[in-house]
Image: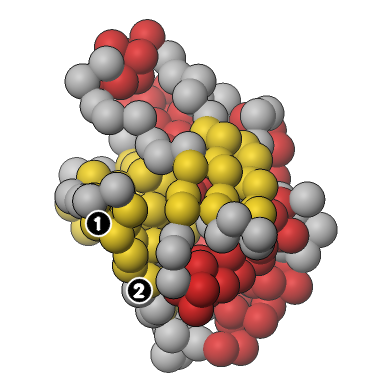
Amino acid sequence: MFGPIEETSTEIAVANAALQPALDRGVEASVRLNGEQLSTAYPEHFGVFEGCCDRESEGLYHCSLDACSDPLAGLLSIETWHRFVAIESLRIDGPSWSLWYVPDHRTFELFGGEDIATAIRTAIEEQPAALLAASEHISWTQEGHRYALELPSLCVENRCYALSKLQKIDIDRETQSITLSWDDSNGLVGRVIGHLRTSPPKHLSIADTETFERVAGYFEQLRSAWE
């Protein structure tokens, strides 16, 4: 899970630091991308990548990481908007694990593999990011509404908000409350669409002490990882 990152170059560096252990230990990768955009903007990077990986269908490539780890890493080194738009998704498969990454959505999900999880955590320990277990579901009722912490999201009823958009977390154990500050910066389209959406919750009040401590524990992990 990415923390509050403002610079595009920083986000790319953090993502690539997290991806590198998977590229080093993975067996194969599947990449969905816009080849026309990449070949026009980065002909050398894309040419090396395309020469190594097999094109399965329009926009979908399969790569053996024994041979193609470096060409794929080269493609991921791009720092312009193409990194988030032209590279649509990446799946890396290891012997007993899979990693799913969607740059534009900041989606980074690892399924299985304690060894690779440890390697990724080590790689990002100095970065504003955290790899947290998403198996636990914590829910509570606040002012008549159902809240749920479902990593990597905080949900209110049927609306969910990406925790990677958090900018600041304040925890008050005396009042059993958590104050959240969110990044609301968006482009023009994002701002227009934003008017149609509800705002993420800025104040969590959890009456049950055990539930509060579990929720606070997760937010403390995030805050600690991002600082």
Is tag 1's residue or tag 2's residue first in the polypeptide sequence?
Answer: 2
Amino acid type of the residue tagged 2 in the rendering = His
Circle 2 packing at 10 Å, graded few (<14), some (14-19), many (20+), is few
Which x, y percent locates residue 54? 33, 59
- Determine which residue is flagged by label 1: 146
Is 108 placed left or right of 117 in the picture? left
Quarter of the image with the N terminus in it: bottom right
Is 224 placed left or right of 202 in the picture? right
Question: Does 114 sit above or below residue 154?
Answer: below
**Residue 88 visible from this viewpoint:** yes
Is 219 placed left or right of 17 in the picture? left
- Determine which residue is flagged by label 2: 137
Amino acid type of the residue tagged 1 in the rendering = Arg
Question: Does 157 sit above or below residue 135?
Answer: above
Q: Nearer the viewer, residue 1 or 9?
A: 1
Q: Quote the CA–CA distance across marks 1 and 2.
A: 13 Å
**Residue occupying image coordinates x 50% and y 20%:** 185
**Residue occupying image coordinates x 65% and y 54%:** 171
**Residue occupying image coordinates x 56% and y 72%:** 213
Is 111 placed left or right of 117 in the picture? left
Which x, y percent locates residue 140? 33, 65
**Residue 42 visible from this viewpoint:** no
